Image (tube, rainbow, N blue to C red):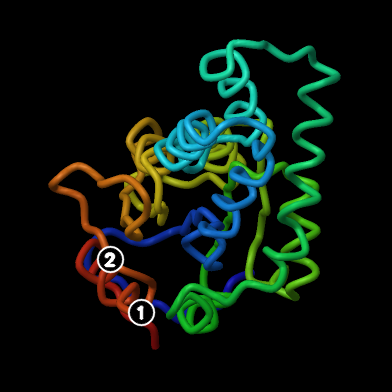
Amino acid sequence: MFRENIQMTNNQLQAIFFDFDGVIIDSNSTKTEAFRTLFSGYNEQIIDAVVAHHRQHGGISRVEKIRFAHEHIIGQPLTDEQLARWAQRYSELVVEKVIAVPWVAGAKDFLDSIRGSLPVFVISGTPEDELRRIIDRREMTGYFQEILGSPIRKPDHVRNLLTGYRLIPECCLFVGDALADYQAAMDTGLHFIGIRGEVPFPATTLVMSDCRGLQKAVSQIFLWKTA
């Protein structure tokens, strides 16, 4: 049972859904460089196109990005076996580095302040087993009730959690840094706060540079405060 230490004066906040990379940990540049390294055997024009596609599609599985790069940028589709090898090479490039990157400013303080108050979920485009290994190695597991990644897409994860935890969508919040996060929130009826990433959000979106003002931003939506 979660401690009842949050008082609400409007919509009752029931749960928070977080993306991981670029929202909780400062790993976006690490993952971008990994794509550049992964495709380093190709010319600069191809590498730049691959990296641009990666940046434009934050929050999407690396498998989908690698497949797209070979089919639509390089023009040489991969077999499933080849795709798996490319994805494994990418994983080898990033895991240890992602374990070592710093927190996004304010993220740890915010998670500490709400720990045990309400369900907090991580939903990422990172493969789920790798995501859980990273979070475990960083000793962050205790902050989250569920840690979920690809290949299941984010809107499906959200819907499953809403059902499993009997949550009301308009009483839940998604915090993300990519259009895929924003779209997952819109598709499932959640409120959304953006952390500034590679691609701009729609003009009406509440967007922050990092998590240092997250408690205040949540209060603007739910009029809540911690006891």
The numbered dot on residue 212 is: 1
Q: Quadrant of the N terminus?
A: bottom right
Q: Nearer the viewer, residue 193 or 161?
A: 193
- Residue farthest left in this picture: 203
Residue beneath the point at 80% across and 58% down: 133
Residue beneath the point at 61% across and 43% down: 35
Specify the amino acid type for callout 2.
Met
Mark 2 Cα within 10 Å, few/some/many (few <14, many 20+)? some
- What's the amino acid at mark 1? Arg
Q: Quadrant of residue 214?
A: bottom left
Helix, strand or loop at label 1? It is loop
Depth check: give the residue in front, 221 or 109: 109
Q: Does the residue at mark 2 contact the one at mark 1 (Cβ under 8 Å)?
A: yes
Q: CA distance from mark 2 to mark 1?
A: 9 Å
Q: Residue at x 53, y 44 (%)?
A: 166
To which residue does mark 2 refer? 208
Q: Is residue 10 above or below residue 194?
A: below
Location of residue 31 with respect to 154 vertically, above or below: below
Residue reaching furthest to the bottom: 227
The image quadrant of residue 6 is: bottom left
What's the residue at 34%, 61% (across, down)?
12
